[in-house]
Amino acid sequence: MAPGTRKRTIDTVPIVCHLDTLTPVTIEELSKIAPVVGSKSCTMESIPASLLRENLDLLLPILSQIKASLDHEILSNFRPISNLKFVPKLTGKVVANRLVSYLEQNHLDEPLQSAYKKFHSCETALVRVQNDMLCAIDKRCCVALLLLDLIAAFDTVDHNILLQRLHPRFLVRGKALDWFASYLADRTQSVVINNTKSKPYPLECGVPQGSILGPILYLLYTSPLADILKHHNMCYHLYADDIQMYVSFATNDDNSLNNYITKIENCLSDINLWMTANKLKLNKSKTELIYLYSRHNLQTSLPSIQFGNDSIIPTETVRNVGAIFDSTLSMVPQVNSLCKTASYHLRNIAPIRHLLSKESTEILVHAFVFSKLDYFNALLYGLPQCVIQKLQLVQNSAARLITCSRKYDHTTPLLIQLHWLPITQRIWFKLFTSYHLSISCQELISKYSPSRKLRSSDSMLLECRSYNLKTYGSRAFRVAAPELWNKLPREIKLCDDIDNFKKKLKTFITVLLVTGNVLQCIAVLPPYLPVSYNKALLNVEISSRVIFIWE
């Protein structure tokens, strides 16, 4: 344990410094924040956000300092209370930047909380959870996954408890703590029906909905949840108010199963007590339980879990943060759902295709169809080709629609013409970018360190993991990512800029598809290559290096 830190308990975290003040905002900082702050408007907007954006050069000197006639010592003068909704967003963003920076520098943010974090998303959270489950099933264990949800979580945050959480738990104090107290105090809300506005009603709890700072404050408010889960030795992952808790156990040991069920029930009871004490409430109707196991080791009589006076009955499928998990992790229900939704939108576009240009049609297809085909597709790596083919057929139909091709026209030339990667390669692409971007995913991987000096020592290789079951173990991120990453040229691995990395990666995969072999010294990626890809379809030069064709 590092000097000056304390043992982490439910109410304490290691602190190496304090947040006493919020540094003043500068014109340069606002000029970077303003263009990226959302510009959604409401009926109370007095000036359109678009007008503010167009006149930023004139307004920034005014926005970056408090009005001279107001008292600088009265913190309510710093609070975003104007009907001018764009300005409160700027204020919230500035303070959020300072708060997040303080949390990250002191390692106070919860590493297994993926919401509202840079380079984290629902997908990276699910990739990590799926990785743990696949590894457990690969060891011939069964996994019990319990999904918890809260009722109106953001609206029931108690202001006094939140301020107590900021200090002493996170040691936000002094003027910084006073600013947060002022930010939360004396808020009101109104309802507008048929252009008639109700009288303002005072808000005694909750963090501002739709704000930039509100979600971060909610994460700090619920931070003790992770300590409760750790206290019970539960595996877990959090995404805002969605809680995923899971344990693995041997399938042939009834005592082990009963012990773990008791552990889950005790943990759930403690979570419920903590929720009640902190004026939050679990949504029992949305609490779901599923057991995950190998399809070669089917389980028929797995017990339910007691939650107070209610029983949580295990189900065959659950919707976990937007993705559908089934009991054998086949992901077939997820793929079927994606195909159904994407095909629905494709059928809606088809009748108006003759009214649209090719460019307009492609925009619609990317917005409504590819957003479904790429939805959580990192979870689909290693699935049988018969499952991936369902998504591929939808992509083929989209290519024919854009190019006005006939129903039975061959689609390989169309995909190349549109610069589209096939579904399998889109999954590779997502895995590569997930590893490149996400710290959460990178923690599952180890760099290859040979025991003695070898020529491969500077090849930026990752350590390959062994597995038992190809159906499960080979799909885990900790196994799949190194196998794919090690086959990339070093030139691509060295790209720090994500845009440049994606550009070179897409070109590399495309050349591989067209030729079947980029360089003799580079191993070919997994052999799901369409045999009909013809080198003549693209004028690609293969020499001593990869030629990047879409620059």
Image (spheres, rainbow, N blue to C red):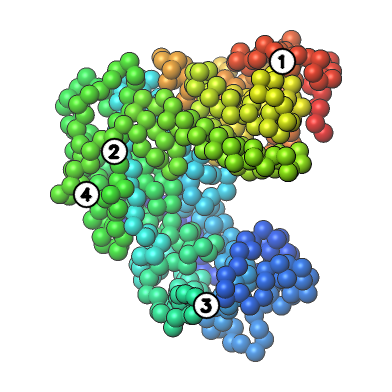
Q: Is residue 462 left or right of residue 148?
A: right
Q: Mark 1 or mark 3, which is nearer the start of the sequence? A: 3
- Mark 2 or mark 1: which is in front? 1
Question: Residue 289: which disc?
Answer: 2
**Label of residue 269 in the image:** 4
Residue pointed to by mark 3: 195
Residue 136: % across, % down: 36, 25
Residue 532 falls in image quadrant: top right
Query: Within 10 Å of the Cα at label 1, are there few (<14), some (14-19), or many (20+) other Cα atoms?
Result: some
Q: Which residue type does callout 2 highlight?
A: Leu
- Which label lies toward us, 3 or 1? 3
Residue at which label 1 appears:
533
- Of residues 172 and 299, the one nearer the viewer is 299
Compare residues 515 and 394 and report the one nearer the observer: 394
Contact, CB < 8 Å: mark 4 with mark 2? no
The image quarter containing residue 366 is top right
Q: Which mark is residue 261?
A: none
Which-is-in-front pick, marks 4 and 2?
2
How far apart, in angstroms, are the residues tagged by discs 3 and 2?
Answer: 45 Å
Q: Which of the 4 image quadrants contains residue 221?
A: bottom left
Q: Which secondary structure lies at badge 4?
A: helix
Q: Which residue occupies the foreground of this view, 382 or 268?
A: 382
Which residue is at a point 67% across and 42% down the rendered structure image? 352
Above or below for 4 versus 165: above
Looking at the image, is mark 4 or mark 3 earlier in the sequence? 3
Q: Nearer the viewer, mark 3 or mark 2?
A: 3
Quarter of the C terminus within the rendering:
top right
